[in-house]
Image (tube, rainbow, N blue to C red):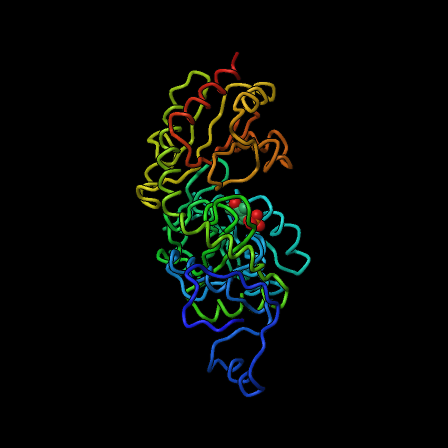
């Protein structure tokens, strides 16, 4: 590279797979930690380091671990910290793929999981066995936006000496910082709100315990879950606007939730910031004034009415993701919860008329008009 006495202001993209050293002693010094440097991209690269430090800062963590996806971050947690015979107690409304990982993949390695309702810490407590090593919850559940009993669960985890992992993807550090509230590990699908533009797949996990971070990092490097430089570079750019995107999206979410609540065709609105939310008091205690950008609602009707609504909301992408800069709408019965029977779904309140909105940063009035038009079309 040309020598320069000045440095680039924006982070360069380092696509190199390998790094050269001056001599064998220099490489020794680096491996022994006397100097800092990179050797082979699977073991770490500058774009991962830059992004990781920025997310660490948001989460109040130090030495977090970046991975090629949110699922890989969960993989790093399980594979790095557990062994055959261990048991996990997890929330019963987690991200669908995580449920599959817990109930179908990990058992092949001798690790088992019990899924229970995290809105009640006593349910978690009842599921703990002598082999339980980990509790894993999401503070806000998908898609019904119920709030976990985070205080009770953190206290329980401490008392029982069990690791507490919080999937902080929905809540983000703008609403909730798990490590400040007794969690041992916080994790993210960076794919969602943190990068925010639906063009990157990445994950992150961090603990305040350096030994835990080292074990997760070892799993990442050994199982090959390392993120690509370009994705880290792209996500860093997205992260620069995270706080401002979050604030605007949340402001829109509040306005949209209130608008939906007033529409005749809407049966129920679920937004943790609204007084009529089943866990409103707990949401205030845990999330403060930041109930987030996710709004769910139910219309009176079945698949036919649902299809009408989706088609009428022609400016809103119908897509099973969240956290994009633009608003998107998803239909849980045909996507995230399609593997469940209609009666299992009904028990969670997920009918054919149930929708989840990931609210973005559009003009508030336009957003409200679009949804008003769509709900009216569904009932006509
Ligand atoms: C999307 C998501 C994941 C998985 O992340 P990917 O980046 O898609 O692998 C995990 N947890 C939650 C809550 C998610 O929304």
Q: Is residue 30 shown left or right of residue 287?
A: right
Residue ranking furthest to the right: 108
Front-most of residues 22 and 120: 22
Residue depicted at x 48% and y 51%: 167
Q: How many marks?
A: 0
| Quarter occupied by residue 62 | bottom left
- Above or below — where is 65 with respect to 125? below
Question: From where the camera sits, is residue 338 visible?
Answer: yes
Q: Position of residue 352 (x, y in %)?
A: 57, 25
| Quarter occupied by residue 186 | bottom left
Q: Position of residue 92 (x, y in %)?
A: 53, 44
Front-most of residues 141 and 265: 265
Front-most of residues 103 and 52: 52
Q: Is residue 114 shown left or right of residue 6?
A: right
Residue depicted at x 41% and y 24%: 368
Residue ranking furthest to the bottom: 25
Q: Position of residue 340 (x, y in %)?
A: 62, 35
Q: Position of residue 196 (x, y in %)?
A: 47, 45
């Amino acid at each position: 590279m040309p020598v320069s006495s000045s440095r680039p202001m924006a982070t360069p993209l380092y696509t190199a797979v390998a790094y050269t050293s001056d001599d064998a002693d220099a490489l020794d010094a680096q491996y022994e930690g006397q100097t800092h440097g990179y050797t082979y991209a699977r073991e770490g690269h500058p774009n991962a380091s830059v992004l990781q430090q920025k997310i660490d800062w948001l989460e109040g963590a130090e030495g977090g671990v970046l991975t090629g996806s949110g699922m890989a971050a969960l993989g790093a947690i399980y594979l790095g910290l557990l062994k055959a015979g261990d048991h996990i107690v997890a929330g019963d409304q987690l991200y669908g793929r995580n449920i599959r990982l817990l109930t179908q993949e990990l058992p092949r390695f001798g690790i088992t999981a019990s899924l229970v309702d995290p809105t009640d810490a006593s349910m978690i407590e009842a599921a703990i066995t002598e082999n339980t090593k980990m509790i894993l919850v999401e503070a806000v559940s998908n898609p019904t936006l119920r709030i976990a009993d985070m205080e009770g669960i953190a206290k329980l985890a401490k008392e029982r000496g069990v690791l507490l992992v919080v999937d902080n993807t929905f809540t983000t550090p703008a609403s909730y910082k798990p490590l400040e509230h007794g969690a041992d590990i916080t994790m993210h699908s960076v794919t969602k709100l943190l990068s925010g533009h639906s063009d990157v797949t990445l994950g992150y996990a961090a603990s305040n315990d350096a030994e835990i971070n080292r074990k997760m990092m070892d799993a990442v490097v050994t199982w090959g879950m390392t993120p690509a430089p370009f994705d880290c570079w792209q996500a860093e750019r997205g992260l620069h606007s995270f706080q401002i995107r979050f604030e605007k999206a949340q402001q829109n979410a509040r306005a949209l939730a209130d608008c939906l609540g007033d529409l005749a065709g809407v049966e129920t609105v679920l937004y943790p910031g609204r007084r009529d939310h089943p866990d409103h008091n707990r949401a205030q205690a845990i999330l403060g004034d930041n109930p987030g950008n996710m709004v769910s609602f139910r219309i009176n009707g079945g698949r036919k009415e649902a299809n009408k609504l989706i088609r009428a909301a022609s400016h809103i992408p119908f897509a099973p993701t969240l956290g994009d800069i633009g608003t998107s709408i998803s239909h849980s019965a045909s996507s995230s919860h399609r593997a469940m029977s209609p009666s299992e779904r009904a028990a969670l309140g997920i009918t054919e008329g149930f929708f989840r909105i990931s609210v973005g940063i559009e003009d508030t009035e336009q957003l409200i008009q679009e949804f008003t038009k769509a709900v009216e079309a569904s009932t006509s």
